[in-house]
Image (tube, rainbow, N blue to C red):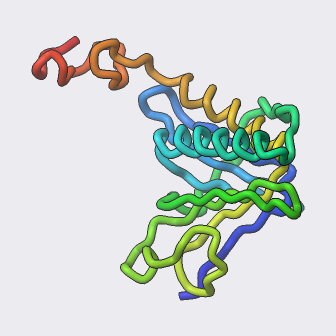
Amino acid sequence: MPRQVFVFDPPERFIAGTVGLPGERTFFLQASGDGRTVSVSLEKLQVRVLAERLAELLDTVERAGGATGEPVEDNDPLDTPVEEEFRVGNMGLAWDGDAELCVIEAMAQGSDAEDSDVEPLADAVDGPDALRVRVTAGVARGFVQRAMRVVAAGRPPCPLCGLPLDTEGHVCPRQNGHRR
């Protein structure tokens, strides 16, 4: 089946955000521009890893004498209504040295073996849907800062195991399954 690739080059906004209360939040990447908004859901861990890897990529580019930029802050909430286009499976990052832009792609979870064969950032005709954005280093740094704040805004971690603590505690593996 032909895939749909939502391309924002560049987006007016590219942010990570959540819907719901801590412990019940759904995480989203959202890109908007040219009168359209695309929201894709993903796991908290995926948001954290994307932000960490994007920061590493930007640091590497900067050390090599590439583009730098002050973070472009965006503290506004997600655009509503938040309608999920797909749930993210794989993601890819790249640096376009000629245009001095970060390329970020989030691909839908594949429903079959053929979908899992498509590499992120490939221009394959068939495969899972994807959200692809091309942003400046400043926008990418702003995305990283916001994403890390969004991830940290959840439930506090257990000091023993690092898992999130509920208001009534949790079953802690470091306590041999006893409540903490």
Q: Position of residue 63 (x, y in %)?
A: 76, 40
Q: Residue at x 56, y 22 (%)?
A: 153
Q: Position of residue 108 (x, y in %)?
A: 52, 65
Which residue is at the front of the view, 164 or 34? Answer: 164
Q: Residue at x 55, y 62 (%)?
A: 86
Image-based side of 3 in relation to 14, left or right: left
Location of residue 119 (image quadrant) = bottom right
Which residue is at the front of the view, 135 or 68? Answer: 68
Question: From what the image shows, is residue 13 above or below residue 173?
Answer: below
Q: Residue at x 25, y 20 (%)?
A: 170
Q: Position of residue 48 (x, y in %)?
A: 54, 38
Which residue is at the front of the view, 172 or 82? Answer: 172
Which residue is at the front of the view, 109 or 159? Answer: 159
The number of discs equals: 0
Q: Residue at x 44, y 33 (%)?
A: 24
Location of residue 138 (image quadrant) = top right
**Quadrant housing the C terminus:** top left
Question: From what the image shows, is residue 122 above or below residue 139?
Answer: below
Q: Position of residue 46 (x, y in %)?
A: 50, 46
Image-based side of 19 in relation to 104, left or right: left
Tell which residue pokes out farthest to the front in this image.
64
Image-based side of 177 in relation to 27, left or right: left
Question: From what the image shows, is residue 82 above or below residue 107?
Answer: above
